[in-house]
Image (cartoon, rainbow, N blue to C red):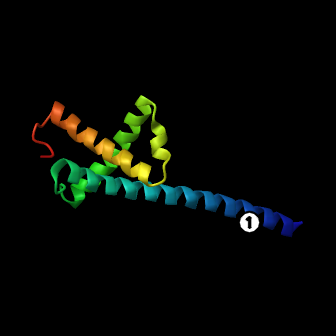
Amino acid sequence: MGFILFLVLAVVAVFIIGNILTWGIGLILVVISWMLAGMFAGRILRGRGYGPATDIALGLIGGFVGSFVLRLIGINWVDDIWLIGNVLVGILGAVVLVYVIRFFGNQNFGR
């Protein structure tokens, strides 16, 4: 009886740990792809980027903005395309973010 209970608990533990690792690795890949998106967006908007730290921040914030914008217009399926979709969403969000900041605030932001 004790051995069966041990096996059941071991299977449950492996299942839980596997799900946590899968979720964590997926999150890490999304963050890395959004960082790359910031680099690409910096190259698109400025030609040479804004520097590593700003490109990374632009990509991370742009990823959230891009996901939000795509959900608003109903085409959030783009985010489901593995890696490429995340990069595209991040680039879109970063570009939107820079233009919104330019429109409402600093006219020279990101130039």
Element type at marker 1?
A: helix
Q: Residue furthest bottom?
A: 3
The answer, for residue 57, to whether it is visible in the render is no
Residue 20 or residue 84, whichever sits in front: 84
> How far across and how far down the image is residue 77, in percent?
49, 40
> How far across and how far down the image is residue 107, in percent?
10, 37
Residue indicated by mark 1:
10
Rendered image quadrant of residue 14: bottom right
Residue at horizontal 17 percent and vertical 32 percent from the top? 103
Rendered image quadrant of residue 1: bottom right
Residue 12 or residue 83, whichever sits in front: 83
The answer, for residue 106, to whether it is visible in the render is yes
Instruction: Note whether 69 is above or below 14 in the view shown.
Output: above
Residue 36 or residue 31, whichever sits in front: 36
Residue 88 or residue 1, whichever sits in front: 88
Residue at horizontal 41 percent and vertical 36 percent from the top? 70
In the visual, does 72 lie left or right of 56?
right
Residue at horizontal 42 percent and vertical 53 percent from the top? 84
In the visual, does 10 lie left or right of 4?
left
Q: Residue furthest left?
A: 108
Query: What residue type is disc 1 on?
Result: Ala
In the visual, does 44 lie left or right of 74?
left
> How far across and how far down the image is residue 109, in percent?
13, 43
